[in-house]
Amino acid sequence: MIAFPISIRDMNTKTIPNVYLKFLAALTAVYLFIDGFGNMANLLAGFIAVCLLVALRVGMGDVKLIALTLLIVNSQMDFSVMRYFPILLACALAHLLIHGLVNWQLPERIALAPSIFLAFALYLSAR
């Protein structure tokens, strides 16, 4: 349910406000307290992937959103970061391609939150 306001705000302003992320972090903390963190090797791979995203200068709101969703999904099942990130890349490239075809120019920045949530939906549906 929180994916829709985050995605809409990100598409309109190209930023994800910390208010949404704090709310999602509170829900995540409660969920992790009840369910646990899951496989630590996957968490380490997720941490390395998040550090790589920071090095690639991806927006901090997007990085925080990916980190929170990785925590949620990892506690729930055996999650593979190496399978998720190619899906995320494909979703982001599709978003970039559609935007480029509609406006006939490539944007400098794109809203990554819709691609993050779409990639998670595709990953979870393919399992």
Image (cartoon, rainbow, N blue to C red):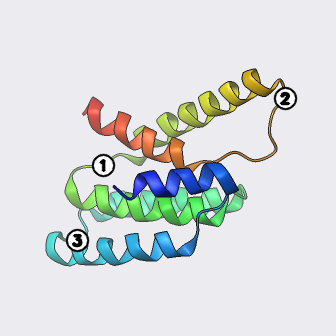
Q: Nearer the viewer, mark 1 or mark 3?
A: 3
Q: State which tag comes first along the sequence, 1 or 3.
A: 3
Q: Position of residue 23 (x, y in %)?
A: 40, 74
Q: Residue beneath label 2, please?
A: 105
Q: Is residue 57 left or right of residue 74?
A: right
Mark 1 element type: loop
Q: Could you classify mark 1 by the number of other residues whose Cα lies within 10 Å: few (under 14), some (14-19), or many (20 or more)? A: many
Q: Residue beneath label 1, please?
A: 79
Alpha-carbon span between mark 2 and mark 3: 42 Å
Taking 93 as reference, is 51 above or below it?
below
The residue sitting at 55% across, 74% down in the picture is 18
The residue sitting at 82% across, 44% down in the picture is 108
Q: In this view of the protein, which residue sits in the foreground, 73 or 110?
A: 110
Q: In this view of the protein, which residue sits in the foreground, 35 or 5?
A: 5
Taking 60 as reference, is 84 above or below it?
above
Q: State which tag comes first along the sequence, 2 or 1.
A: 1
Q: At label 1, which amino acid type do we have? A: Phe
In the picture, the disc for residue 31 is 3
Which quadrant would residue 97 be assigned to in this image?
Answer: top right
Taking 54 as reference, is 3 above or below it?
above
Alpha-carbon span between mark 1 and mark 3: 16 Å
Alpha-carbon span between mark 2 and mark 1: 36 Å
Q: Could you classify mark 2 by the number of other residues whose Cα lies within 10 Å: few (under 14), some (14-19), or many (20 or more)? A: few
Q: At label 2, which amino acid type do we have? A: Gln
Q: At label 3, which amino acid type do we have? A: Tyr
Q: Position of residue 74 (x, y in %)?
A: 29, 57
Q: Quadrant of the N terminus?
A: bottom left
Q: State which tag comes first along the sequence, 2 or 3.
A: 3
